[in-house]
Amino acid sequence: MRADAGIILYMQATLTILGSGTSMGVPTLGCECRVCTSTDPRDRRSRPSVAIHWDDHCVLIDTGPDFRAQALREKIRHIDAVFYTHSHADHILGLDDLRPLSFHHPNGHIPLYADNASAQIIERVFDYTFSEETKYPTRARVKMHRLEGHESVEVHGMRFQRVPLIHGNIEVAGFRFGNVAYLTDMNRIPDTSLPLLQGLDIVIIDALRKTPHPSHANVEEALEWIKRIQPRRALFTHISHELLQAEMDEELPPHIRLAYDGLRIPFEIEA
Ligand SMILES: [Zn+2]
Ligand SMILES: [Zn+2]
């Protein structure tokens, strides 16, 4: 909505890093490396997810196995919608903990958005939530919607643009909202997705570790993608126990940092 005098109205929003860790989390079970035993709270990384808050609204991207603890930590009491990047365990296993929040949702259910391939797996893993025959009485009241390709959805004035990404040998979803993009679990951005990533203030991008990985960008690759996308700032996520926060603060250019759990990033979107 634009005011008559041509003044652009902005809406204040906040992106919260619920989790910045890789699928195994940091500390990693059974490991006593310098990062897993670090006393810097920023080196404790729960499974990857973000929350976007504006007005009284809250949207999540993914609900990993640490979702319940993340929601308690960030005092999340209401969820308007959840977008899923893909169906790997570290991104979906917290879905069942949407239950108490879903019982009080004004629509009677929380809308979920995923591409068909991910939705099919989520519906199978949480069969008792979605199956018509076995509707468990205290199941999560959620409704799955398919979101494919370059489709986008508006939630209470905030548009969420799906951005196709490549994660090893599967397509996953990144999301853009305002001038912020969340690109977890990727090692390649298709050429056709690059126009969706122009003019970004902030990109949150997969940077697993320094050594190469078949389905995640490492630090070097993430830096190359950042150079191509040219955001004003970038934050790394999906971080393993190979990267120490304090050391990376020294190594990275000033506009690029590792994300950490609980980090809040204010941003504005055109209202
Ligand atoms: Zn992952
Ligand atoms: Zn370790």
Image: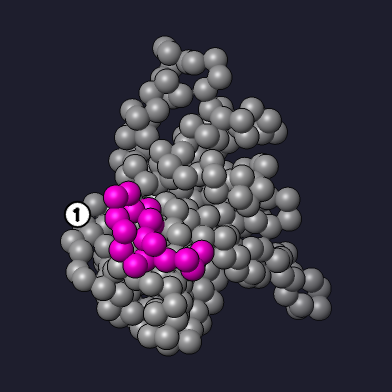
- Identify the residue at image location x=30%, y=68%: 242
Residue 203 percent location from the top left of the image: 46, 71
Q: Main secondary structure of the magenta part?
A: loop
Report whether 271 appears left or right of 3. Answer: left
Label 1: which residue? Answer: 169
What is the three-letter code of the residue carrying label 1? Asn
- Identify the residue at image location x=34%, y=67%: 34
Q: Quadrant of the C terminus?
A: bottom right
How is colour applied across the structure in the image? one colour
Residue 142 percent location from the top left of the image: 53, 31
Magenta includes 83?
A: no
Q: Quadrant of the N terminus?
A: bottom right
Which secondary structure lies at badge 1?
loop
* Number of callouts: 1
Q: Residue furthest top?
A: 133
Q: Nearer the viewer, residue 149 or 137?
A: 137
Residue 89 percent location from the top left of the image: 34, 42
Q: Nearer the viewer, residue 193 or 223?
A: 223
Q: Which contiguous range is marked in magenta?
A: 25-42
Report whether 217 appears left or right of 36. Answer: left
Can you say whether 177 is above or below 210 in the image? above
Residue 219 percent location from the top left of the image: 30, 75
Magenta includes 39?
A: yes
Report whether 187 appears left or right of 266. Answer: left
Q: Report crowding for label 1: few under 14, some 14 to 19, many 20 or more residues within 10 A (C-alpha).
A: few
Q: Is residue 178 visible?
A: no
Tell me where residue 72 sits by quadrant: top right
- Identify the residue at image location x=72%, y=75%: 8
Q: Nearer the viewer, residue 97 or 12?
A: 97
